């Protein structure tokens, strides 16, 4: 018995290591015996088409950031675009108005992020690598219905930058994607350094002004926007010649690159610059007015990050028509059991709910023209589709 005890003690570290592996069934190297995800999952090449919500208004020729808040899209232009945020209608993309940020200067605004009840604006653009006035503005979301708002500025500098000589598009200190959580401000650099994306953290809540390097990853492309959804999925948009959406999930706390990493190819979207991941697991991407008129694109990403016991609905089980519709539409439900449905606005407000039964279900919908989501769910299935009312 004593010999067996020492043998198990010797083998224990190796047994633990054997439990590590790819835990995602959608990966090509899924390991049925793996109990803990080690970030090694490999995925098949995935390319999808996006849908266009609308062209961006003339007031946004260089849209570099966009987030959803209540019934608004909150947006910004980048360098030279003025010290203001611009509000768009969230269901149509139409321009509403500007809000001036007093005392702020748009040196090179590149990203937006929402945390708790505040909006953060990343004045983080640094194409030449020589800026010494980098920082983040914070404004209260409660003030955006005013014409003017005040702000707080959080300056920062990179802990490992010692050379401030100009190096146009050839250095690792340009940032176009920020996200905020309880740890502080996460900065994701663009990747001028051969596609190497740096992750830095500024703990503004403890008063730090230093961007501490946490991690890095080579994506062989340039990151131009980042966002964190309510479930903790981190997304990047950017380009490697075509637009992409990278999804990071099932990672160790604070270590975004330690878990699953999946790339979704989106084709050519012009110069895509911003990303927002909403509560419906829809990715919203904007492009600026460079190669073509600026646009708002969207696609649903939930089916690529299935975790736990979720089982995403087979798209062939549900047929919607006409779509776009005027006053009502038909849901052809292909399965032999009834399910619940909900229709929500882009902002997540529930507008209608009920049951779908096998066969054709006609649904009246008397809300204004715009984009909506219909979600289908039962005990073991979930799925979301877009609806367009004319």
Image (cartoon, rainbow, N blue to C red):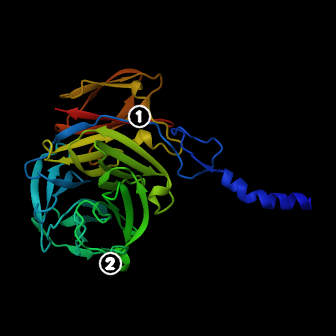
Q: In which quarter of the image is residue 343?
A: top left
Numbered circle sitting on residue 340: 1
Q: Residue furthest bottom?
A: 207
Q: In which quarter of the image is residue 158?
A: bottom left
Q: Can residue 107 be seen in this view?
A: yes
The quarter of the image holding the N terminus is: bottom right
Q: In this view, does 106 lie to the left or right of 273?
A: left
Residues at circles 1 and 2 in contact by the CB criterion of under 8 Å: no
Nearer the observer, 327 or 25: 25
Residue holding disc 2? 209
Q: Could you tell me residue 34's position as x and y percent?
A: 63, 47
The quarter of the image holding the C terminus is: top left
At horizontal 14% and vertical 53% (from top left) the residue drawn is 62
Count the marks: how many?
2
Q: Could you tell me residue 300's position as x and y percent?
A: 34, 40
Badge 1: few (under 14), some or many (20 or more) residues near its Cα, within 10 Å? some
Q: Could you tell me residue 143's position as x and y percent?
A: 18, 66
Q: In which quarter of the image is residue 360?
A: top left
Decide which of tag 1 and tag 2 comes sooner along the chain: 2
Q: In this view, does 330 lie to the left or right of 88?
A: right
Nearer the observer, 155 or 306: 155
Q: In this view, does 92 lie to the left or right of 37?
A: left
Mark pair 1, 2: CA separation: 50 Å
Nearer the observer, 285 or 17: 17
At horizontal 22% and vertical 33% (from top left) the residue drawn is 388
Q: In this view, does 21 lie above or below 47?
A: below
């Amino acid at each position: 018995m004593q010999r067996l005890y020492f043998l198990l003690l010797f083998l224990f570290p190796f047994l633990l290591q054997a439990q590590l592996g790819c835990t995602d069934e959608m990966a090509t190297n899924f390991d049925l015996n793996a109990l803990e995800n080690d970030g090694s999952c490999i995925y098949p090449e995935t390319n999808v088409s996006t849908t266009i919500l609308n062209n961006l208004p003339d007031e946004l020729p260089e849209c570099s950031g966009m987030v959803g808040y209540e019934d608004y899209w909150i947006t910004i232009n980048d360098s030279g675009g003025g010290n203001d945020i611009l509000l768009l209608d969230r269901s149509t993309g139409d321009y509403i108005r500007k809000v001036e940020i007093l005392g702020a200067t748009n040196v090179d605004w590149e990203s937006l992020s929402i945390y708790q009840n505040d909006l953060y604006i990343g004045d983080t653009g640094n194409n030449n690598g020589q800026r010494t006035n980098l920082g983040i503005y914070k404004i209260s979301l409660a003030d955006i219905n005013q014409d003017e708002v005040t702000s707080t500025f959080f300056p920062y500098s990179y802990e490992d930058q010692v050379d401030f000589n100009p190096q146009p598009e050839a250095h690792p200190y340009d940032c176009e994607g920020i996200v905020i959580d309880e740890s502080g401000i996460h900065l994701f650099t663009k990747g001028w350094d051969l596609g190497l994306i740096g992750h830095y953290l500024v703990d503004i809540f403890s008063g730090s002004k230093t961007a501490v390097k946490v991690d890095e990853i080579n994506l062989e492309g340039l990151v131009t926007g980042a966002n964190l959804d309510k479930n903790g999925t981190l997304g990047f948009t950017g380009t490697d010649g075509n637009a992409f959406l990278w999804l990071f999930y099932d990672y160790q706390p604070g270590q975004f690159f330690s878990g699953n990493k999946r790339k979704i190819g989106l084709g050519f979207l012009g110069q895509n610059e911003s990303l927002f991941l909403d509560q419906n697991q829809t990715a919203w991407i904007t492009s600026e007015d460079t190669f073509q008129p600026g646009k708002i694109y969207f696609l649903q990403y939930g089916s690529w990050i299935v975790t736990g016991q979720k089982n995403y609905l087979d798209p062939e089980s549900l047929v919607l028509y006409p779509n776009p519709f005027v006053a009502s539409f038909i849901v052809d439900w292909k399965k032999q059991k009834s399910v619940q449905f909900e229709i929500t606005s882009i902002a997540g407000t529930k507008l209608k709910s009920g049951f779908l039964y096998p066969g054709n279900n006609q649904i009246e919908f008397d809300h204004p023209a715009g984009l909506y989501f219909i979600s289908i769910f039962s005990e073991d299935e979930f799925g979301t589709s877009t609806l367009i009312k004319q």
